[in-house]
Image (spheres, rainbow, N blue to C red):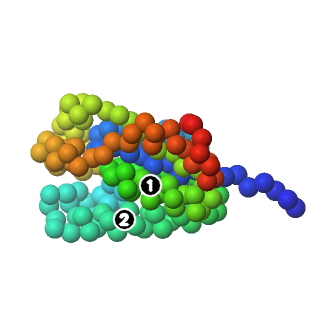
Amino acid sequence: MNEKRKVPTLYLMVGLPCSGKTTLAKQIEQETGAVRFTPDEWHIFLFGDDFHKSDEHDARHDRVEALMWQIGRKLLRQGVSVILDFGFWAKEQRDEKRAEAKALGADFQICYPDTPFPELLRRVETRNLTGENVFTSITPEDMKEWNSLFQPPEEEELERRTAAGTREAS
């Protein structure tokens, strides 16, 4: 039987904490049926909110993300769309995932809620007071440092959507 297999999509959620990545990821999950991987949820379930409390936090978080991507690659190979809600602050990271999606025969889309920095600071303050399943000890100083490291996607990068290895406007 010659069935045409649906091409899965790798969605990358790009942005700093409190930019709206997870809210958007949950929306995409509901609309598309894609499997969503949000590292903070897994990390907090496994280790608790150890941000600023454990020297092992970064290594643990890296291992959670590596496990998620290992499962994500397997799902993409099986034709299931995947949402990586990791932040992807560096263009190099995004380019790497775009190339991996292409190699796996998957479409690729960057999802970037472009939230102004003052709003990020307001949201992190609110989240620290009311958050559940999120790290609640992120400081304004953390946010300022991360903002200086963050490389927002440029318009050309956002417009390039890899559809099974081709280039098209989204």
Q: Position of residue 30 (x, y in %)?
A: 54, 41
Q: Amino acid at mark 2?
A: Val
The foreground one among 150 and 46 is: 150
Position of 140 with respect to 97 (left or right) is: left
Image height of 155 relative to 87, above or below: above
Residue visible at 14% across and 57% down in the picture:
52
| The disc label shown at residue 95, or none | 1
Tell me the SS state at disc 1: helix
Outermost residue on the right side: it is: 1
Q: CA distance from mark 2 to mark 1?
A: 21 Å
Q: Is residue 37 visible?
A: no
Residue visible at 55% across and 44% down in the picture: 161
Q: Which residue sits at x=32%, y=60%?
A: 43
- x and y percent of residue 53 in the render? 14, 61
- Location of the C terminus by quadrant is top right
- Type of residue at label 1? Asp
Q: Which of the two discs, 2 and 1, sits closer to the camera?
A: 1
Residue 28 locus on image (x, y percent): 52, 41
Look at mark 2 in the image and give the residue it sits on. 64
Q: Nearer the viewer, residue 71 or 127?
A: 71
Front-most of residues 83 and 130: 83
Instruction: Say few, some or many: other residues with alpha carbon within 10 Å of mark 2 (under 14 / 14 to 19 / 20 or more).
Output: many
